[in-house]
Amino acid sequence: MGTKRIYRGLPLYWHQETMANDQQWLESIVRNTAPFSDAWTKARIVQLAYAVPKGIKTQILYNLPLYGGYTSELEIAQALRSSCNLEEYPDFDTQVNEDYVIRALNSWHNKQFAKAVSRNFEIYVDREYSNSFLVVSTARTSLNVDRQLPPLAKFRPLFNIAEMGRLMRMGNFERLTLKTHGYATPAFKFYQEFIAEIESLSVKGPINKIGTLENRSVYIGYHWPSEMPLIHPGLWSDMGEQKGLSLKFLFIVALLAWIFGTGFYIILSLIVVPLLDLLGIKLSLSPLWHWFNWHQISDLIAQWNGVTLTVFVLWLLLMQILRISVYQRDRYRAIHYGAPDLAEFFWRLDKVLGENPYTSMPFYEPQKETIIANYYNQNFPPMNVNLIGHSMGGLVIINVLRILSDRFGKEDRLEYEKNNMGDYLQLDKLILTSPDIPLEFLREGRNNYVRSAILRCNEIYLFSSDRDLILRYLSILGNWFSEPSIEMSGLRLGNVYLKPCKNPNNQIVYQPYIRVMISSQSAVQPTSAYDLFEKFNYIDCSQMPGLNCISLPLNVWTSLIIDLTNTLFFIAGKVDIHGGYHFTNTTSFDILKFLITRDGLSRTETLAEINHLISGKPVLFLPSDQQVGNSSDPDLED
């Protein structure tokens, strides 16, 4: 035992004034943290060091009491080690000993425990496919709702990111693909979808042109806190837990509704009612001058209150609809939790990839293993990183690159830093599927950080659809009062589609366009940054089955019919107009699968393979090496 304790000894005894708070905190950590991870283990050590609180029934967790009252650190370490299969948790086996227990209890005693257990993400490895990992942000959708952990029968929690670095170094992986989700994707839904993707990417079948994940490829799913609209428990529990703030909100809305409702009532009774009277249209409201008739005061007050009450109800209903749609809630979490946590994951991963993976492992032939370790340290090449962001996940990815741009530097450092994300990671492909990103980000004066991020990617693929009603309608409603311009709220990158136009040589070429309502406009405007648009490989999935259920071509006469039909089928669950890109039976998923599993191909071979995959399919492809521009040619489909 090399670590000295700074507390008196064991067992620990509760302080009456902090007992309830300490118990609640420790139990919350244990419930919401990956079992046998570093943070979970430290919380369990403190629990086992305390005696069972009075009045609380003994609870059992992994064959150990929740509170143990153990009398020695060695006893706690042995108890924890006996509660799991040490072969299944090798880093837990290596790390958890008497010294580890003392360090954890020291941090509790000197009030450094929050720092000791603070983790912004957790990592899990697939028990069947060792090259598939889950990275989960530890931020919760609501403090009143516990996190939903991945199914432990499928995923094994890692002790910390150092264990992941060790596994990746020892596996000598060459490629890393990370995919994150979009709006309204709670944890259970993401886990199900990710498991299906792992199966599709990993199961070895007949030799095909698409490919599967090889032993040198890593596939990572990243989940940031998102919730299901309308029914997520956090939407309603917050109001019950914070009754005072809820009443404060109602009071403010009522006060503003009374002020604006009164103004609205004056306008109605002074202008609108007299004009309608002249036209012979009678309303239940009286003209404003009737207030001089004292006999009608009670009726007029009722009319006035009726108008202000109507304004109050309508405002309250609108605000509640915006709240339960969870769009702004998810967007806030994506930017302030999802992106920073993922950026931290990458720079911590880069750091541990540079460390000797053998230093903490017992070996029988240390001289031989030192030679192997030195070989890896000297010859481990940078890993190519592919990033896939769907919907609001695209916003997460772009903000991650924005955060890491402090490390990247700006354009003046592109020449010699190229696509480096660190010492052992380099950015390769950026794949955006239906990104919930303003198209205006590709304009001059709006692309301050997007430019540096985009130019660092070797390739960018944009999967989009003009028939994505979630982006076209819900996004403009949710962003109308938050984006700095109307165009930023109404035109999203995920709605870009390819329109046939005639070039000066009278040849039909495809150009990126975007639909406003029933009409369309060129996605590239005179103020656009052309070099950014030309960096994209456009894959238009507007008419792809799974995203769309009607084969009508788009024009001003069919646009509303297309929207209405797809809306009905979407409500009926027959089509997913926003998330169908990742269905494993779609053409878009075949292309995604090809892009992340087939490295080493020339540009010509890659384009030929994509064209082969979309052959005979209602999917259009515009490679980045074909010129895009601002076109005003008429729609050839009209």
Image (tube, rainbow, N blue to C red):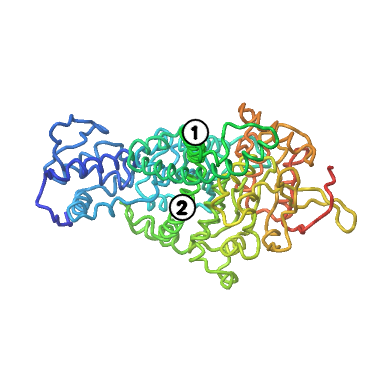
Give SS at disc 2: helix
Left or right: 588, with 386 as reference point: right
Residue pushed farthest top? 572
Nearest-to-viewer mark from 1 and 2: 1
Count of numbered circles in the view? 2
Counting from the top left corner in percent of width and height, residue 263 is at: 52, 46
Can residue 322 be seen at all in this image of the molecule?
yes
Counting from the top left corner in percent of width and height, residue 235 is at: 43, 37
Task: Tell me the residue that label 1 is attached to.
Answer: 296
Name the quarter where the C terminus is drawn: top right
Counting from the top left corner in percent of width and height, residue 162 is at: 38, 53
Question: Relative to the observer, which residue lies in front, 177 or 67?
Answer: 67
Q: Residue at x 47, y 43 (%)?
A: 257
Which residue type carries mark 2?
Leu
Left or right: 563, with 1 as reference point: right
Q: Mark 1 or 2 closer to N-term?
A: 1
Can residue 317 be seen at all in this image of the molecule?
no
Residue pushed farthest bottom? 412
Task: Tell me the residue that label 2 is attached to.
Answer: 342
Counting from the top left corner in percent of width and height, residue 446 is at: 61, 62
